[in-house]
Image (cartoon, rainbow, N blue to C red):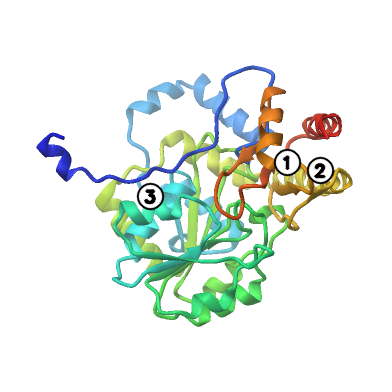
Amino acid sequence: MNNWENNVRKVTPYVPGEQPKEAGIIKLNTNENPYPPSPRVRQVLEEALENDGTDRLRLYPDPTSEDLVSALAEYYKLDNDQIFVGVGSDDVIAMCFLTFFNSDKPILFPDITYSFYDVWADLFRIPYKTCPLDRDFNIVKEDYYAENGGIIFPNPNAPTGVETPLSDIEEIIARNPNSVVMVDEAYIDFGGESALPLIGKYDNLLVVQTFSKSRSMAGMRIGYAMGHKKLIKYLNDVKYSFNSYTMNRTAIALGKVAVQDEYYFNETRNKIIATRERVKKELKALGFTFPDSKSNFIFATHKEKKAEDIFKALKKAHIYVRYFKKPRIDNYLRITVGTDDEMDRLISFLKDYL
């Protein structure tokens, strides 16, 4: 090893879902929305290109992302200074880790959860402790009453899809007035109850959401946090010390119109919810069991067949789902809810395979 390598920050990186390049596949492995973004997004993009839009790329974007922040503030009935935006919720959460989790006490998050949390903790040298979910994959709220340097968990959880009741979330927040509590709501629009109403009551709560799932814009990378003005100011202070221009001009413009098209947003998410509920019944009939998902995926196990074997068989048939070879969940598949046609083809394959 060369001497300079002694000073390299070494971490075990997050492993994203597979992004196959082949054509004609059914891609149900990364929880993307199967429907396109709002038609207004395409309209604004085309207008920008027609009106010498590429010339705008030589200019820096607005470092405050005011157009996007204002659209979100209007939608959620908040003030602009209660909202922080970033390059996807991953960027937002990483910035929150860097800003708020600086105690020598461990931060707390579930043992089965979004697998970026421990990566960020290792990267930023933050001590952490995982709290086991119960046998039904529910958060045990009492585990989060212990002394800590901060708390984060998704709701609904990933990869399980299980929702934590808002009353339990509020109790966790109330029991930790000296810690920042982050609720990662990437999947909240598919049937969960948001913790957003609590930010007016608790100054230590941050609610994080994303455009990647319910707004069909995973490729645009837009995420945001909502909370007390003091929390948002601290986040912006760190952002401006790290990278002032996190949001590009195109993302700001397209994010704004996506938020404003509420009709299309509700139409597509309701399609996904309806498809999810139908597919739950069909999977049960095939011998699968799963927690009651409130997300855009189903976390399923079969009573006879091994998840890994099903995963491999599906992949050979060009149907991609997510398999996690990890303790407690290595016999489960996370199946993204696609279009009705895609899910029909999945069910048809599983009927033949089983």
Quadrant of the rendered structure where residue 61 is?
A: top left
Q: Position of residue 225 (x, y in %)?
A: 48, 58
Does label 2 or label 3 sit earlier along the sequence? 3
As displayed, is residue 298 above or below residue 34?
below
- Secondary element at image label 1: loop
Judged from this view, the residue extending furthest toward the right is 285
Compute the Cα span from label 2 to label 1: 7 Å
Q: Is residue 353 left or right of residue 296?
A: right
As displayed, is residue 172 above or below residue 7?
below
In the rendered structure, find residue 64 and report the number of the disc placed on it. 3
Q: Residues within 10 Å of mark 3 (few under 14, many from 20)?
A: some
- Residue 316 visible within the image: yes
Q: Mark 3 belongs to which amino acid? A: Thr
In the rendered structure, find residue 337 and report the number of the disc placed on it. 1
The residue that disc 2 covers is 275
- Which residue does the image show at 65% across and 72% down from the upper left? 166
Q: Position of residue 108 (x, y in %)?
A: 45, 67
Q: Position of residue 57 (x, y in %)?
A: 38, 27
Q: Mark 2 belongs to which amino acid? A: Thr
Does label 2 or label 1 sit earlier along the sequence? 2
Q: Nearer the viewer, residue 272 or 302?
A: 302
Judged from this view, the residue extending furthest toward the left is 3
Q: Do the numbered discs 2 and 1 sit on residues whose CB atoms are within 8 Å? A: yes
Q: Is residue 131 left or right of residue 23?
A: left
Quarter that holds the N terminus: top left
